[in-house]
Amino acid sequence: MGRRAELVSTYAQIGKTYVRWAPSLLLLAVVVFVPLGLVHALTVDAHVGSLDFGAGLKLVGPAAAVFALAATGLLGEIFYAGAVAISLTHPHDGHPPSLREVAGMVSYGPLIAIDLIYGAVVAAGLATFVVPGVLLFVWLGLAAPIVEIERHGIRAAFSRSVRLVRGRFLLVAAVLIPFELLGDSLADLATTFTHGLFGSELLCHWLADTLANVAFTPFYAVAAVLLTVDLIREKGGGAELHSKPPS
């Protein structure tokens, strides 16, 4: 299969999986992103980049703003992808797990740590020379699904992500980067539409961020899980998707 055909096939699989699992994906997204939307809104509302750092530190302000916004923008996406990995790949008593069962199966410690570390290192790369941030975003982007599919620890999950992406970087980048950029664009659009809807800018940012994440992050999470499953199988491992969501 050529690269273009493979990419088209991957996107088609993502769309079909989202449609099948939409109710569970959206409900889980609400649980995760309503509180995390407030965290990101507080960061945006703080206007980190507008702080006066002094004439000798003019570059620090913008860099700090990019770091803070990028890190909190990614916050929750990785944890959510890990939870989606459980929903799509772990049978429970012969059936896909319910949301309550997913909550009991999540590896909270490793997944939260990976969420924070991944967001921080990608944000640091973006805040310095941009390209390192993009590379880290792709190379480490499968760590959260790996934690839940293969039950690795934090360091092992990051290492495993690098090994899976090796030789398939362009495919992973061509899937994850567009979803991330489209999600960010949707958040900006939602912010524009909700601007002035409430008396508080904080509430507007919170609503916009939550709506954007609930609407679009499931696509990113499904993409990350499907890529992880496919690459594990391609490299000799065992990982399967459920044929259908819970009824």
Image (cartoon, rainbow, N blue to C red):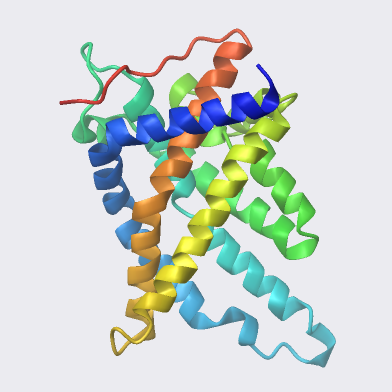
Seen at 69% across and 26% down, the residue is 3
In screen coordinates, is 20 left or right of 4?
left
In screen coordinates, is 73 left or right of 191?
right
Q: Is 89 situated above or below 183? A: above
Observer-nearest of 144 and 11 = 11
Q: Is 69 situated above or below 228? A: below
Res 164 → quadrant: top right
- Point out residue 141 in the picture as x, y percentages from the top left corner: 60, 39
Observer-nearest of 24 and 94 = 24
Seen at 41% across and 67% down, the residue is 39
Specify the quadrant that holds the N terminus: top right
Seen at 59% across and 38% down, the residue is 175
Is residue 112 in sight in this rendering?
no
Please state the total of marks drawn on the protein image: 0
Observer-nearest of 185 and 92 = 185
Q: Is 195 situated above or below 36? A: below
Res 2 → quadrant: top right
- Point out residue 106 in the picture as x, y percentages from the top left corner: 35, 33
> Residue extending furthest left?
247
Res 127 → quadrant: bottom right
In screen coordinates, is 192 left or right of 179?
left
- Point out residue 204 in the picture as x, y percentages from the top left corner: 35, 78
In screen coordinates, is 148 left or right of 182?
left
Is residue 141 in sight in this rendering?
yes
Seen at 56% across and 34% down, the residue is 143
Q: Is 103 situated above or below 203? A: above
Specify the quadrant that holds the C terminus: top left
- Point out residue 5 in the picture as x, y percentages from the top left corner: 62, 25
